[in-house]
Image: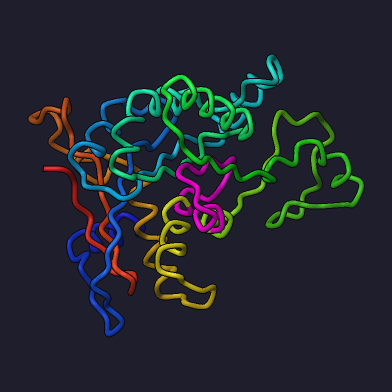
Amino acid sequence: SVHAFLAHLLAAPCWRGPMASPKTVRIGGYSAMWGDIDMAPKQLVNQGDCRYLIGDYLAETTMAILAKQRKKDPRMGFALGIAAMLRDNAKEIKAKGIKVVCNAGGMNPLGCRDALQMVCAQSKIDFKIGCVVGDDITDRVPELRRQGLREMFTGEEIPDFEFMSANVYFGAKPIAAALAEGCDIVVTGRCVDSALVLGILMHEFGWKDDQYDQLCMGTCAGHLLECSAQCTGGLFTDYEAEKWDNMGYPIAEVSADGSFTITKPP
C-alpha cells in the first residue's frame, strides 16, 4: 500500500547510489492545504536552514471555491494566505536568500502575483516574482465538448452544463524554468502537488526528462513535503499524549542522486 511504502521510505530514507554528490538542497514544506497554520513558515525560516520553501494550498474543492470567489470579484480567486505569509516573513526570507514556490495562485495566478507585488512595495523589499499560467481551461470547455473529448477512463462525454472550474495539471518543468530565470518567488495555478519540489530539484541539479530514478525520488520527496506536518508527527496515532503547539514542519535534504533525508527544525 502507499502508506506501507511511505513508512518504509521514512524508516530508511538515506539511500545512496554511485552518483552521490556533496551538494544538497534543503527544502521546507510550510503548507499542506488552504488554511494551514501560520507558525510553520516562521519556524522553517528562522530555524530550518532552508534554501527553499514550498506551499501547497490547493485541492479540487478549493479550486471550486476559488472559482466562485473569482466570479464575484475578478481580483480574487487565489489563496490570500500567501500574501500574509510573505508580509510576516519577507525581511527574513530576503536576508537569508530563501526562495518560495507555491500553488497559491489557484484560479487567479496573476492576481496572486499582483497581491505579492503589493506586499513587496509596502514592505520596501524587492522580490522577483514568477507566475506560471495556462492551467485554467474553463473557457475552453464548450470547444472541447464540440470536439468530442471524453473522460479518459470511462469514455463518458463532457456533461452538458456550466462548469465552475476546469483545470489541467502541469508538472515541474515550468517551475524549473521560472527559477532558471532568477525568480525569488514562483506562483502557480493548478499543478501536481509534488511538482513544487521536483521543479526545484530539476533546476538545482539539472535533472533531465530521462533521469527516471532521480525524478522518482524527487517526486517522493515532493509528496512528503506537500503533506507538511502529516509526515513529521501529524498522523501520530497517540496524538492525545502529545502537544501540537510547536510541531516541527518537514524539511527534505536532497542530494543530486535523488537520495534524501526527511528532518525538521530542532
Tell me the residue at 85%/47% (across/down). 144
Tell me the residue at 27%/64% (across/down). 24
Extreme residue toward the right, this view: 146
Image vertical order of residue 221 relative to residue 81, above or below: below
Tell me the residue at 41%/61% (across/down). 201
Q: Position of 202 compared to 258: left or right?
A: right
Q: Is residue 172 magenta?
A: no
Work out whether residue 92 or residue 75 is closer to the camera in this orientation and state it: 92
Residue 258 location (% of width, % of height) = 34, 70
Extreme residue toward the bottom, this view: 18
Report the quarter where the C terminus lies: top left
Q: Position of 252 compared to 129: left or right?
A: left
User: Which quarter of the figure has residue 109?
Assistant: top right
Q: How many marks?
A: 0
- Region of the chain picked out in magenta, as a range: 177-195
Extreme residue toward the left, this view: 241
User: Which quarter of the figure has residue 112?
Assistant: top right
Image vertical order of residue 76 relative to residue 224, above or below: above
Work out whether residue 106 or residue 121 is closer to the camera in this orientation and state it: 121
